[in-house]
Structures are given as C-alpha cells and as structure tokens.
Amino acid sequence: MSDVLVIVPTFNERESLASVLTAICQVQPRVDVLVVDDNSPDGTGQLADEFARANPTVHVIHREAKHGLGPAYIAGFYWAVDRDYDWVVQIDADGSHDPRVIPTLLAVARGIKADLVLGSRWVTDGRVDGWSVARQVVSRTGNGFARFALRSRVRDLTAGFRVLRVEALRQLHLETIASSGYCFQIEIADRVEQSGGMIIEHPITFIERVAGKSKMHFGIVVEALTRISAWGIKRWFLRR
C-alpha cells in the first residue's frame, strides 16, 4: 500500500473526473486515490466505480446525499487515518488543479516534513488562468479578510490543492469541524497554523474549470463570513 492517499471529492463531475483520475494515475502510479461522491445525479459515482474496477489503486466512497465539501473531505481524512497513510493530497475533480504538480507538492512536504503544503495562487509566481479581474479581486479580498480576522500569515487560506501530513490531521480534532463549504479549507489551515504546525505555500497556476458548474453560491460566502468573523471576535476577547 502507498503512504499517500489522493482525495477527490465529487458532485456532478462526470465530464471531468475520468481525465483527472487518468492524469493522477499517470503522474503518481504508486499512490492510492479515493473518490468521495455525494450521490451525484449525473452518474459521477458510477463512473468512479467503473474506473476503480479497472484501476486497483482507485477507491470510492458513496455518500447518501450532498452535504458539502467539508464533510466529504472529513470522510476521506478518516479513511486515511484508519489505514495509516502518511500523507493526504486534496485535489478538485473539475480540472482546475494540475495533477502534474502533485509530485512537487509531495516533495516539498516530505523534504521538510511540513504539516501542510498549499498550492497557492496568491504568492510570488502563483497565478490564475481564466478568471475575470473582478473574481480575482473577490478572492484576494476574501483571503485578506480571513488573514486579518485570524491573524494569519498564510496568503491563500482558501487554497484547495494541498498536501497534509496525516499525523497532523490526527491532532486537529476532526470531529469538531463544522464548516461545510469552502470555509472548510480556511478552518483546516487555521487549525494547523494555530497548533504551531509548519505551513508552506508553493506557487501554482489555477485553471478555471472548462466543464461543469462552479459549486460556489451565496450560502457558502455567508458561512465563511459568519464563521471567520466569529473566530476572529473570539480570539480578540481571549487576548484581552
């Protein structure tokens, strides 16, 4: 068994999943892959099963309903912890993260035994392809607000392409994480940072999806603003 598990959460990603899984298996043939599907009505789960039958390193978890990105990753984290993997890789199923970068992120993590390596868009040499200026401003502003509220040094707290050390995951009290949307990425990075863990940001090029629809919606933004504000206020009072 590999010491690396690549977790791919899916919901209606049938158009892009096969190419992403193929690329992962080509680039990292010796790692295991776990697809966590939230009962996609477009047949993504069935496609994942077909791929798994032909590729013994690919595994699938079928969840009963769409509960959000956070719970999907938590399910994958528990799967990794229970099977004693050393590292987990988080990657989107929509093609926005280039699987060819996985070996680089893993090399960085292993080289210095980092607790979290982020594929960052907002550090030097990081970039985004296919986003409007307005969308870039929204992302940068959201990250800036989170950094200010949480007193964080991380430039891209919402980065979804990342490597986590499983031993660090064991210390994060996963059962207490309640974020379901993209705020989940912030909460995980914040917990690693607050615990004194080592976080490295490695520049990547984020590519706007070419298939399917973005999962971003107003409720996700509200959740992030509400939770980040609450965490920031709580810390302000604790420091007084």
Image (cartoon, rainbow, N blue to C red):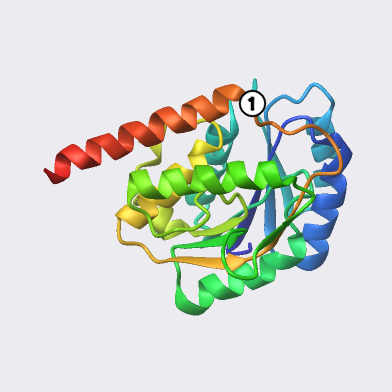
**Residue that appears at 54% across and 29% down:** 221
Q: Is residue 28 above or below residue 159?
A: below
Q: How many marks?
A: 1
x, y percent for residue 120: 59, 60
Say left or right for 1 vs 93. Answer: left
**Residue that protrudes farthest toward the bottom in the picture:** 111
Q: Residues within 10 Å of mark 1 (few under 14, many from 20)?
A: few
Q: Is residue 127 visible?
A: yes
Say left or right for 71 vs 191. Answer: right
Q: Is residue 55 visible?
A: no
Which image quarter: residue 226?
A: top left
Which image quarter: residue 230?
A: top left
x, y percent for residue 136: 65, 47
Q: Is residue 91 above or below residue 217?
A: below
x, y percent for residue 218: 60, 23
- Amino acid at circle 1: His
Q: Secondary structure at mark 1?
A: loop
Mark 1 sits on what residue?
217
x, y percent for residue 223: 48, 27
Q: Is residue 233 above or below residue 125?
A: above
Quadrant containing the N terminus in the rendered view: bottom right
Question: Depth check: 46 or 130 in front?
Answer: 130
Question: Depth check: 174 or 187 in front?
Answer: 187
**Residue that appears at 78% across and 30% down:** 12
Question: Depth check: 219 or 185 in front?
Answer: 219
**Residue that appears at 58% across and 57% down:** 162
Question: Depth check: 175 or 11 in front?
Answer: 11
**Residue that appears at 72% across and 54% down:** 97
Quadrant containing the C terminus in the rendered view: top left
Say left or right for 70 vs 204. Answer: left
